[in-house]
């Protein structure tokens, strides 16, 4: 289904989060890095907000709390101290992080606040040991030109990153605390973006500004994009966790489609004269009907003392299998709701039955027991008793919403650009002053100092690259848009004798094609890149080996460039080694050599190079071959 976005009244706002590449964390002196080692200790907590907090907690946060999970925190002394463990008050705001945020604010022409205040934003999903996230508004009301369109920047905020989720089960969730406290910048645009393409180009433009500061982290997890998407007669839906820039426009496209499909379903339900009050919380136990089914889910639930119950959805026949976006049907949306509220693994809806071990005879019996008419649908859930009822309640509520309107909700992006239900949309963020951290005045002097040293804008950097390093416009643009601009400059200044355009091509096109081959390029550290080119400069390997070395290092990030060289046998051959190889090839081609004499040089050259390509200078090969042929044909 294609969507006319302007007729659909599409509106998108972006919230771009990116980790800052500071030395230390935002509120302590721990290094702002993720640990590669296993944790040295783990502690368990169950978050219990105090009564006063609960009184004002927004509904979304309260639901997270009600999930009542046990939370395990993994920690190690290299990346965490008492601040992350919530055993010591936070230290004053990290000056380097504030300066970077001021830089970004100025680049975005935003109005910087005279005094910045640390606030607490309640989060009860356990990702913060304190139960809140510390956040600091730095500037308001900026703007950015994106392909001739002025995009308002509503706010620039400095935040502490949350713990890193390592795993989750039904009853517990584990966070690693190394990431907790890493400074994050959040940039939010006004909801003025009107097409998926504009959303993509705006995200790209903000990314360019951030990279221009050369003070942001790169790699998977360092960037997270949240999108607020609505269409006319639809709803404001918040989509979290879009990690890939390329995915932004796809996510918007799918969300517009999803909301349109839901509006069509609503209209159809109204045409069918289905009213909200026709949908009742009448849950019927169907355990006895399904007890002899082959369904693994039903059998597993019964084995654990659970049950199967069903509910009739008046007038919904055929709508549950309606696909909203690829792979996501109205039935899928209901299943996700049931999973959130009832912690159930899933549900069966009548549009997809008979299937999954539930036969036609079961379908007919359930339908009859529920009193379903020809145009009715039904849902079955099999699980623990309480979960089943909570799940079905959530299903009926979602069905009523299908008649009412597109629900406002928070969703999570899937890797293919589709999304799934995460939780209800939170109310306005609840903020409290963080009394442990004093406010910071931003002096005129400090701002003027930053303004004097403001980084160049991306277009300007691209122009400079072209003239300074003699590289083409396209390549310069790609370099500015890549994560490797900083490392490029340090490589070309230290690696004399390698053409800058060659380095730029490796850092852009070659790494991109490795990414497409699913090589984990994000693992490459700056040092890997610098050392691989260093080996070429030192004559230890040929430049043709660079890609192979990087490919190997991406999959073995703990290793060094020299180890890669050894492992892949891509070191340069010594003159003596090369002489041996030449002699061997010439001996093996005795017949050709005695027939053609020195005319065999071309063929011999091909054979030898086939063996030593990337490990020997072709000129030396030619020289040795010639000498050898002269000798044997004399
Ligand atoms: Zn710390």
Image: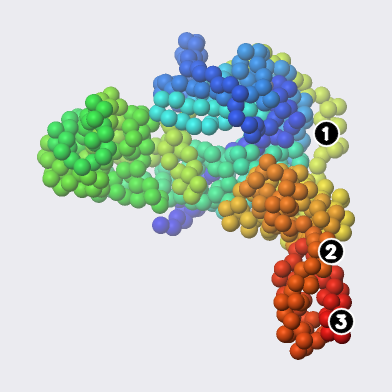
- Residue 83, located in which quarter of the rendered image? top right
Q: Nearer the viewer, mark 1 or mark 2?
A: 2
Residue hosting label 1: 450
Quarter of the rendering occupied by the N terminus: bottom left
Tally of numbered tags: 3
* Left or right position of 402 against 255: left
Q: Determine the residue located farthest toward the top in the rendered image.
A: 51
* Left or right position of 232 against 441: left
- Ligand 1 neighbours mark 1 (CB distance < 8 Å): no
The residue nearer to you, when weighing 497 against 433, is 497
The residue nearer to you, when weighing 256 against 536, is 536
Quarter of the rendering occupied by the C terminus: bottom right
Q: Is residue 384 above or below residue 500?
A: above
Q: Secondary structure at mark 1?
A: helix
* Left or right position of 1 against 117: left
Give the image location of residue 90, x and y in percent. Answer: 68, 17
What residue appears at the point 73 percent right and 45 percent down from the top-left corner? 560
Task: Kindly report the distance in space between the C-alpha atoms of the residues bearing marks 1 and 2.
Answer: 58 Å
Packing grade of label 1 (10 A; few <14, some 14-19, many >=20) is: some
Whether pointer 3 and pointer 2 mark residues with C-beta atoms closer than 8 Å, the reply is no
- Residue 477, located in which quarter of the rendered image? bottom right
Tell me, for residue 576, which label it has, or none: 2
Tell me, for residue 630, which label it has, or none: 3
Q: Secondary structure at mark 3?
A: helix
Whether pointer 3 and pointer 1 mark residues with C-beta atoms closer than 8 Å, the reply is no
What residue appears at the point 47 percent right and 10 percent down from the top-left corner? 51
Residue 541 visible to an observer of this rendering? yes
Task: Kindly report the distance in space between the C-alpha atoms of the residues bearing marks 3 and 2.
Answer: 18 Å
């Amino acid at each position: 289904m294609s969507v006319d976005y302007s007729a659909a009244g599409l509106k998108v706002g972006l919230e771009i989060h990116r980790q800052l590449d500071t030395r230390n964390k935002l509120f302590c002196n721990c290094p702002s890095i993720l640990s590669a080692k296993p944790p040295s200790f783990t502690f368990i907590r169950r978050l219990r907000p105090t009564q006063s907090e609960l009184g004002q907690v927004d509904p979304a946060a309260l639901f997270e709390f009600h999930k009542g999970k046990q939370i395990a925190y993994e920690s190690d002394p290299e990346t965490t101290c008492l601040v992350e463990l919530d055993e010591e008050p936070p230290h004053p705001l990290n000056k380097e992080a504030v300066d970077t945020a001021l830089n970004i604010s100025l680049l975005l022409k935003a109005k910087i606040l005279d005094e910045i205040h640390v606030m607490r934003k309640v989060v009860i999903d356990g990702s913060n040991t304190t139960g809140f996230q510390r956040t600091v508004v730095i500037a308001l009301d900026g703007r950015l030109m994106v392909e001739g369109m002025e995009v308002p920047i509503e706010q620039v905020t400095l935040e502490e990153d949350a713990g890193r989720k390592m795993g989750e089960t039904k009853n517990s969730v584990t966070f690693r605390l190394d990431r907790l406290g890493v400074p994050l910048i959040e940039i939010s645009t006004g909801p003025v973006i009107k097409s998926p393409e504009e959303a993509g180009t705006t995200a790209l433009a903000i990314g360019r500004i951030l990279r221009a500061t050369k003070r942001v982290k790169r790699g998977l997890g360092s960037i997270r994009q949240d999108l607020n998407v609505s269409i006319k007669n639809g709803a404001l839906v918040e989509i979290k966790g879009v990690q890939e820039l390329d995915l932004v426009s796809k996510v918007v496209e799918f969300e517009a489609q999803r909301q349109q499909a839901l509006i069509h379903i609503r209209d159809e339900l109204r045409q069918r004269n289905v009213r909200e009050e026709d949908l009742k919380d009448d849950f019927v136990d169907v355990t006895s009907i399904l007890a002899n089914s082959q369904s693994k889910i039903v059998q597993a639930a019964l084995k654990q003392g659970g049950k199967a119950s069903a509910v009739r959805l008046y007038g919904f026949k055929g709508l549950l299998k309606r696909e909203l976006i690829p792979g996501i049907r109205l039935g899928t949306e209901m299943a996700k709701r049931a999973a959130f509220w009832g912690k159930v693994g899933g549900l069966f809806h009548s549009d997809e039955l008979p299937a999954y071990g539930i036969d036609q005879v079961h379908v007919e019996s359930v339908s009859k027991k529920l009193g379903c008419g020809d145009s009715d649908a039904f849902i079955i859930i099999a699980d623990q008793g309480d979960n089943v009822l909570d799940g079905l309640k959530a299903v009926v509520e979602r069905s009523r919403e299908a008649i009412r309107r597109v629900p406002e909700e928070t969703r999570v992006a899937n890797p293919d650009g589709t999304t799934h239900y995460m939780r209800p949309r939170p109310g306005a963020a609840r903020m409290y002053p963080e009394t442990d951290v004093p406010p910071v005045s931003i002096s005129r002097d400090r701002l003027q100092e930053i303004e004097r040293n403001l980084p160049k804008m991306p277009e300007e950097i691209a122009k400079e690259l072209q003239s300074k390093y003699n590289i083409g416009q396209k390549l310069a643009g790609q370099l500015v848009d890549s994560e490797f601009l900083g490392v490029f400059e340090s490589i070309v200044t230290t690696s004399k004798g390698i053409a800058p355009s060659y380095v730029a091509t490796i850092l852009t096109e070659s790494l991109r094609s490795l990414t497409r081959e699913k090589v984990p390029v994000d693992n490459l550290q700056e040092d890997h890149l610098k050392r691989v080119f260093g080996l070429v400069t030192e004559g230890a390997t040929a430049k043709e080996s660079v890609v192979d070395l990087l490919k190997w290092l991406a999959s073995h990030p703990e290793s060094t460039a020299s180890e890669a060289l050894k492992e892949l046998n891509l070191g340069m051959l010594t003159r003596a080694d090369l002489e041996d190889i030449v002699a061997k090839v010439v001996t093996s081609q005795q017949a050709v050599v005695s027939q053609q004499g020195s005319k065999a040089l071309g063929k011999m050259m091909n054979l030898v190079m086939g063996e030593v390509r990337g490990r020997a200078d072709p000129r030396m090969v030619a020289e040795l071959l010639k000498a050898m042929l002269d000798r044997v044909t004399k």
